[in-house]
Image: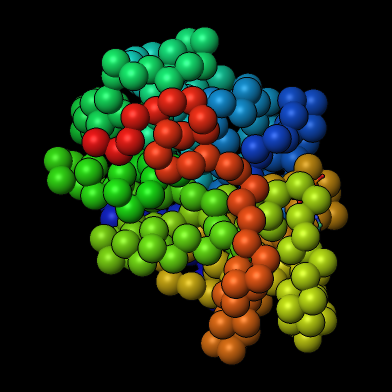
Amino acid sequence: ATKFVTLNTGAIMPTVGLGTWKSAPGEVEHAVEYALKNGYTHIDTAAAYQNETEVGQGLKASGVARGSIFLTTKLNNPDQRAPLPALESSLSKLNTPYLDLWLMHWPAPMTKDMKADKEYDWLDTWKAMEDIYLAHGDKVKAIGVSNFSVEYLERLLKVARVVPAVNQIELHPSCPQDDVVEFCLKKGIILTAYSPLGSDNSPLLKNPVVNKIAEKYSVQPANILISLHANKPGHTVLPKSVTNARILNNAKIVDLTEEELTQLHKIDETHHFRACHPAWTGWGGLGFPDCK
Ligand code: A2P
């Protein structure tokens, strides 16, 4: 299992980061502070999570030097037409001079009232993010994407001046997205797994295959689901928790055998589900046009 990966920028990204999707203001400050005080060096948030201010408070309260933390946030869909002010807002809320990684949250521009913005092309957002990265490298150390399928990545790479450093997608044994993983590895794009446990009330934590492997290593099922990614090249992983004991526990990764990786991979054959439900085209039933 690896503790770090290297981005296509040359920067180091810690394999395990604290996820904060659904971590509410009021609990996320403490989660971030506790994680950083207990060895985490990687925190992931998003403007859409509406908790950047509180994540920033947690960063500050931890007393950990900014330079020792890898911090990611994401451009919100309704801000795709104006990425620079959105970046400035994220930096201000997070109370930080720079991001280690800034992601386009979805290839899905939206209006302020959260409807599909069919008059605007997400590829123009990527071009704007590239401009910002190339002009303001002191504010944004790397740019990337999230929730991109192969067809969206192919369209982006045809014109990209900057290859995304990362594609952050839902990845767990019941959502392996093999085609996206294979494509990203080939292009040197790091994969970041969100909802690695299968999100809230996940059946994966009760899965017999996961539990059997967990028993062998005397760890929790969550550790196996997290270690799965740490045992693959080019992967990082973002377990979310606001519970001290779990935050502490989830940082522990173990070396899995090839046979165990195969067993985990087979879970999808009988127990497929996605925690997040976008269709890759016509996204979220909101009427987005197919990938152009
Ligand atoms: P909580 O935040 O209340 O501790 P994912 O990372 O796949 O999105 O999963 C997050 C969900 O899994 C949350 O409901 C979180 O609860 C829960 N969780 C996090 N760590 C563990 C763990 N070690 N064992 C069981 N559940 C966990």
Instruction: Say if 228 sits above or below 261 in the image.
Output: above
Q: Residue at x 42, y 34 (%)?
A: 282
Viewport quadrant of the C terminus: top left
Instruction: Say if 174 sits above or below 198 in the image.
Output: below
Q: Is residue 255 visible?
A: no
Describe residue 224's horizontal placement relative to residue 75 as left or right.
right
**Percent position (x, y) of residue 10?**
30, 56
Instruction: Say if 92 sits above or below 278 in the image.
Output: above
Viewport quadrant of the N terminus: bottom right
**Percent position (x, y) of residue 184?**
34, 59
Q: Residue at x 60, y 43 (%)?
A: 276
Q: How many marks?
A: 0
**Percent position (x, y) of residue 287?**
43, 26
Q: Residue at x 38, y 34 (%)?
A: 107
Identify which residue, 49 or 286, lies in the foreground. 286
**Percent position (x, y) of residue 273?**
64, 56
Answer with the quarter of the image where residue 225 lies.
Answer: bottom right
Q: Residue at x 31, y 44 (%)?
A: 152
Answer with the quarter of the image where residue 105 lies.
Answer: top left
Answer with the quarter of the image where residue 109 lies.
Answer: top left
